[in-house]
Image: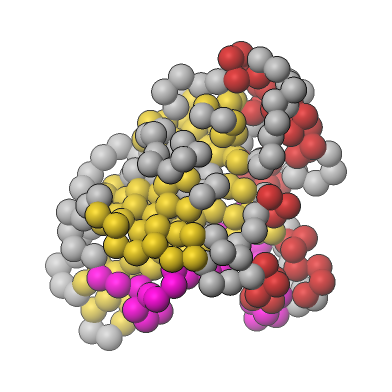
């Protein structure tokens, strides 16, 4: 049996459709095909909606079988944003995947970025007690918020998400080191200064202000040392990379135009994550 210590989920393009995959060893595995059950969700959105019961257990069991990588791996996958998410009651934000370009069309003002660890909400919740807050979370991923600042005001332009989603049982934020690079140069490398308990406190507190909805990406832990609530300024043409062990590398080209999504590129970290 293959040892699958951590469930790492992703979305890739399969003939123009969003398709659910898993990152196993150094390969993308088509998860619905590996499970082989007709009612198993074909997309991340479907999995978020139906992840209760034994659904994730079935996925883990399928990925542990010998030969699963050879039989169900995807050749040269184009990885997309893991989820078509809503963000802070923005129902239809521009959501970018790894290696997707931010089409910057700004005449005045400045572009700012705020890299974060985000939790993806899997169940609706309002006024959720702290001891049940973890039940609202489907998983964790990386997120970069892109805002346009001008005249003392800011507006959200887009968010970058991905590439990997890790389920709550497999995620330990305390001490997680996050690396930030611009144009291939290391800018910062810091441990994430937050605990699981603090994340759950934030989720419970936010649910007391508004109802959290399935499919929402909730930025919960900003990169240490960020300059203000909107992060820091980025010039057009910059390539920004955010990397964390277990979550892969989220790369965005600022002001360049490419097709949505990308082939999975080989990362720099030891786990060879996308």
- Image height check: is 135 above or below 163? below
Q: Nearer the viewer, residue 174 or 70?
A: 174
Q: Going 55% across and 47% down the picture, which residue do you hit?
A: 246
Residue 53 coordinates in the image, percent (x, y): 85, 43
- Residue 82 placement, left or right of 150: right
Q: Going 27% across and 76% down the picture, which residue do you hit?
A: 149
- Residue 36 placement, left or right of 113: right
Quarter of the image with the C terminus is top left
Residue closest to the far right: 53
Residue 6 coordinates in the image, percent (x, y): 66, 42
Residue 60 coordinates in the image, percent (x, y): 74, 34
Residue closest to the far bottom: 152
- Image height check: is 77 above or below 98? above
Residue 194 placement: quadrant: bottom right
Q: Nearer the viewer, residue 49 or 111?
A: 111
Residue 93 placement: quadrant: bottom left
Residue 108 within the segment the image draws in magenta: no
Q: Going 69% across and 39% down the picture, which residue do you hit?
A: 5
Residue 22 coordinates in the image, percent (x, y): 59, 34
Magenta stretch in the rendered image: 204-233
Indicate how the structure is coloured in the image.
Answer: secondary structure
Quarter of the image with the N terminus is top right
Q: Going 47% across and 70% down the picture, which residue do you hit?
A: 222
Q: Is residue 37 visible?
A: yes
Q: Nearer the viewer, residue 121 or 251?
A: 251
- Image height check: is 98 above or below 219? above
Q: Is residue 103 visible?
A: no
């Amino acid at each position: 049996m293959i040892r699958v210590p951590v469930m790492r989920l992703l979305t890739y393009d399969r003939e123009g459709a969003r398709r659910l995959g898993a990152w196993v060893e150094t390969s993308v595995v088509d998860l619905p095909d590996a499970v082989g059950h007709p009612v198993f969700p074909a997309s991340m959105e479907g999995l978020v909606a139906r992840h209760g019961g034994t659904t994730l257990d079935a996925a883990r069991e399928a990925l542990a079988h010998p030969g699963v990588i050879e039989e169900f791996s995807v050749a040269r996958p184009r990885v997309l944003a893991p989820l078509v998410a809503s963000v802070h009651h923005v129902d239809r934000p521009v959501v970018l995947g790894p290696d997707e370009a931010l089409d910057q069309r700004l005449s005045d003002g400045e572009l700012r970025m705020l890299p974060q660890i985000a939790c993806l909400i899997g169940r609706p919740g309002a006024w959720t007690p702290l001891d049940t807050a973890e039940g609202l979370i489907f998983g964790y991923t990386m997120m970069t918020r892109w805002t346009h600042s001008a005249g003392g005001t800011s507006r959200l332009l887009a968010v970058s998400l991905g590439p990997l989603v890790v389920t709550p049982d497999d995620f330990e934020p305390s001490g997680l080191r996050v690396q930030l690079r611009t144009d291939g140069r290391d800018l910062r490398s810091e441990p994430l200064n937050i605990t699981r308990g603090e994340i759950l406190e934030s989720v419970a507190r936010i649910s007391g202000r508004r109802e959290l909805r399935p499919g929402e990406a909730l930025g919960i832990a900003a990169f240490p040392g960020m300059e203000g609530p909107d992060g820091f300024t980025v010039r057009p043409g910059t390539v920004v990379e955010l990397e964390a062990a277990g979550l892969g590398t989220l790369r965005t080209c600022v002001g360049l135009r490419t097709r949505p999504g990308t082939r999975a590129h080989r990362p720099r970290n030891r786990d060879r994550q996308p």
